Image (spheres, rainbow, N blue to C red):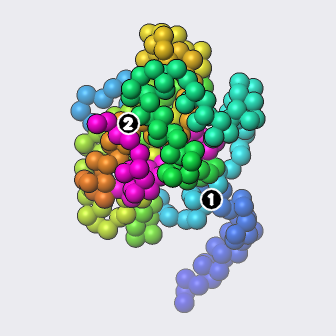
Amino acid sequence: MKALPWILGALLLSACHTPKAGTRAEDTAACVLDTQPEVIPVGTPKPGELNEFFDLPDTPAWWASAPMDTERERYRTALVARLGEEGLKQRALLERQNAHPSSREVKSGKREADNSDRVLEGSAGKMGPASCLEWRLFQRQASRYPMLEHPTEFGAYILRGHGRLRVYLSGMGSVGGQLRHEVRDRVVADVANGFEPVAHLHNHPFMFDRKPGDRMYTTELTKDEMGGALAPSLTDVQAYRMMREHFGLKGAWLTNGLDSIHYTSEDFDRLNAWD
Ligand SMILES: [Zn+2]
C-alpha cells in the first residue's frame, strides 16, 4: 500500500502531461522507432550498409495510415511537382512503367510487366496508403540518404508475437538490397520462438535524372525509367518464394513512402519469378 500514493501521483502527473487515451497525438507518438536499435554486424558490409533490429510494443498505431508530417508532405510536394497529382497515383505509376520500352523490348521486362498487369487487374496485391510502420522505416533510410536526391533501397522483415513487433531493417547507400544470413538467422530463430513472419517490406525508390552508367545501374534503355511503381520484380518474387519455403513468410509489402501494395503468400504463385 505504501507505493500507492506514488502510483496515483504518477498517474495524475501523466494525465496532465500526455494526450488523452485514444487521441491521434497519442497514436502518432506510439509509432516512433528507437533512435538506438541493436546493430547486427555482418561480414564485409557494403558501403553505407546498416542492419538494425527493433523490438517494439505492438500497438495499433503502427498499423494505422502514416501521418502526413512535414517531411512526408515535402516529399509528396516534390513528387507532385515532377509527376502531377494524377501521375503519382499507384495505377498511373504501374501503367507508366508498363508502357516504358524496357517493359516491352526485353523478355524479363515483359514478364515483370505481367506482374504489374496482375496488380492492375486486381488479381494480386492490395493497394493502400503507407502505414505508419512503413513510413517510419522509409523515413529512417531517408534520414541517411535523401530519397529523391540519392535514391536507395531498404528491406525489412516484420514479425509479430507475444505482444511485440520485431523489425529487422537493412539498408545501404545504393539501390538494390542485401539479404544477409546474419539477419535471416535471427528471423528464423524468432519464428521458432512463436513470432509470426508477417511480411518482408522493401521500397521502390523514384529515380529521376538518370544517366547511363550512373550509381543506379542506368543503361540507355532504362534512363527514363523512373521507378516508384509497386509491382514486384522477378528477383523480388523469387526471394519471397524462398522465404516462404524457408521460414513461412506470410506476405510481402512494397512502398514508395506515400503508398504501398501488400501481397499475400498466395500472390507469390500468381506473380512471375525468374524461370
Ligand atoms: Zn523490388
Residue identified by numbered label 2: 234
Residue 178, by quadrant, is top left
Quadrant of the rendering where the N terminus is positioned: bottom right
10 Å neighbourhood of mark 2: few (<14), some, or many (≥20)? Answer: many
First in sequence, mark 1 or 2: give its number: 1
Q: Which residues are magenta?
A: 249-275
- Please provide percent x and percent y for residue 65: 64, 54
Magenta span has 263?
A: yes
**115 to the left or right of 32:** left
Magenta span has 155?
A: no
Q: Is residue 52 visible?
A: no
Between residues 216 and 22, which one lies in front from this camera angle? 216
**54 to the left or right of 70:** left
Residue 183, by quadrant, is top left
For the point 26% across and 54% down, the residue is 245
Between residues 7 and 24, which one lies in front from this camera angle? 24
Which dot marks residue 185?
none
Between residues 72 and 143, which one lies in front from this camera angle? 72
Q: Amino acid at mark 1?
A: Ala
Q: Is residue 215 above or below residue 178?
A: above
Determine contact: label 1, label 2, CB under 8 Å.
no
10 Å neighbourhood of mark 1: few (<14), some, or many (≥20)? Answer: some
Q: Amino acid at mark 2?
A: Leu
For the point 25% across and 53% down, the residue is 246
Q: Under tag 2, what secondary structure?
A: helix
Which dot marks residue 64?
1
Q: Under tag 1, what secondary structure?
A: loop
Residue 19, by quadrant, is bottom right
